[in-house]
Amino acid sequence: MPLWLKEKLWMEDCIRKSLDGYKGSVLFPEHHQSHAASAFFPSPFSSAAIITMDGVGEWATSTWGIGNGNKITLQKEIHFPHSLGLLYTAFTYYTGFRVNSGEYKVMGLAPYGEPRFVNTILENIMDLKDDGSFSLDMKYFNYCQGLTMTSGHFHDLFGGPPRKPESELTQRDMDLAASVQAVAEEVILRTGRHVQKETGEKNLVLAGGVALNCVANGKLLRDSVYDDIWIQPASGDAGGALGAALFTWHQVLGGNRETNGTEDLQKGSYLGPSWTDKQIEDFLVTNNIPFQKMDEDSLIDSVADSIAEGKVAGRFSGRMEFGPRALGNRSIIGDPRSVTMQSIMNLKIKNRESFRPFAPSVLLENAEEYFDLQVASPYMLLVAQVQKHRCTNMTEEQTKLFGIDKLNVPRSDIPAVTHIDFSARVQTVDGKHNPGYYKLIKSFRDKTGYGVVINTSFNVRGEPIVCSPQDAYLCFMRTEMDILSLGNFLLTKEDQPALHEEKDWREIYELD
């Protein structure tokens, strides 16, 4: 109530004051309307089915409908407190990760476990129907009336209290993650099939926080009930700003919308701020930072050489990405052929749990050489299997290893981006919206024969993705990255003066 009385009830006045006396209309699209608009209007489709799923908007937690031309129509909803997003968040909390932050860790942990609690969930917690609709038994949850996600009934059902954050992960935690992931996939698959039958649409668009579950997205695509699927890169609530603007432009004001069925209107999601080389050079010179100024081709060639030698590079270039995925402009790059690179980058650079997987960026024309993926995935929102001929089967002894112990068993000839279940979260790079990144991967391919690199976001655990040159330099200096390409400037770690900070940076950021 204090928040409502202070700000929420006066939102229109706040907006007008912030816009210095704006006199026009102030519109308030609904939460899932905004998600739906963010999914459909930037998509390449003239018409498509729409599914949105998240924790909760005003009251809706899941919706489906149709987009056609410059209009969207939502037809069905599931209402709070019955929520797939909140079910997933409950298991995130119960397995010791941070609510509304650590859900992707549960997805990453799932392949280490067995889904042995699926029936427990479906027989006690969730009543799931054939069409993907469901209800939750609220006695197992505490999010409606308390300060935690799960109740004593939930703890009794699964045999104990929630795992303490940062404590040792057990096989049970991994099995819980595998189980809720399996249930989420089943809900999404049933919903997708039902919506296709109801709408008759050949294409599907997705948004809402659940649409960031790239494993489920990949399975829905392979289910082949739709010819193609497009997912809003900023599927979470940040994307609601884009959706609200597009809803107003197209649906309220009648703005025209042109599509060709293949190319989306998201511009690679490179929609954030950028810095000129002059601005970057001023920053470097002002702060007495040693650097080499190079032309683009020379810099790309030098960075590719370093990566091929097993070094780790920070890349800061052009406009920042919009959404939670770094797509080459605010990225940390490494060699996917390295058996030890996943552990090195997790522990020495990202300062995060060793089990967390890394994504590959692959040249679009080479994607099918490495992954069972027949469509483009420019926004790193689809998981695909590594091609079987590249995989290495585990020995009988290796298959008996405890979950995390399997991490160090090489599983393919690109082990640093091959997850424990021989899958990868793929970003395809075609060079249209990011020619510099395309050239870098191509240069790496020319040197090594591999048209794929590791791509992880340029930040450490708990820190936002770096935005400015200063952010990038600080992150570079605080970690064991070897080189940093900052625009057309190359920085090497051994040339840099020691960084002196009064406070350990690990204490600055909350754990994610």
Image: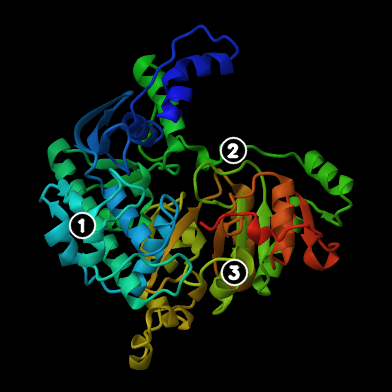
Q: Give residue 447's position: percent from left, percent from top.
A: 64, 70
Q: Give residue 70's position: percent from left, percent from top.
A: 33, 23
Q: Give residue 72's position: percent from left, percent from top.
A: 28, 27
Reading the chain from its start, which is encountered first: label 2 or label 1?
1
Mark 2 and mark 1: Cα distance apart in space = 35 Å
Q: In front: mark 2 or mark 3?
A: 3
Label 3: state its secondary structure.
helix
Residue 186's disc is 1
Q: What amino acid does circle 2 point to? A: Gly
Identify the residue shown where x is 65% and y is 44%: 467
Instruction: Quadrant for the N terminus, please.
Output: top left
Which residue is situated farthest in the top direction here? 23
| Mark 1 nearby-residue class (10 Å; few <14, some 14–19, many ≥20) | some
Q: Which residue is mark 3?
A: 345
Q: What amino acid does circle 1 point to? A: Glu
Mark 2 and mark 3: Cα distance apart in space = 26 Å
Residue 200's disc is none
CB contact under 8 Å: marks 2 and 3: no
Residue 272's disc is 2
Identify the residue shown where x is 21% and y is 68%: 117
Which quadrant would residue 454 be assigned to in this image? Answer: bottom right
Residue 50 visible to an observer of this rendering:
no
Residue 282 visible to an observer of this rendering:
yes
Identify the residue shown where x is 40% and y is 83%: 392
Relative to 320, residue 4 above or below: above
| Mark 2 nearby-residue class (10 Å; few <14, some 14–19, many ≥20) | few
Q: What amino acid does circle 3 point to? A: Met
CB contact under 8 Å: marks 3 and 1: no
Mark 3 and mark 1: Cα distance apart in space = 33 Å
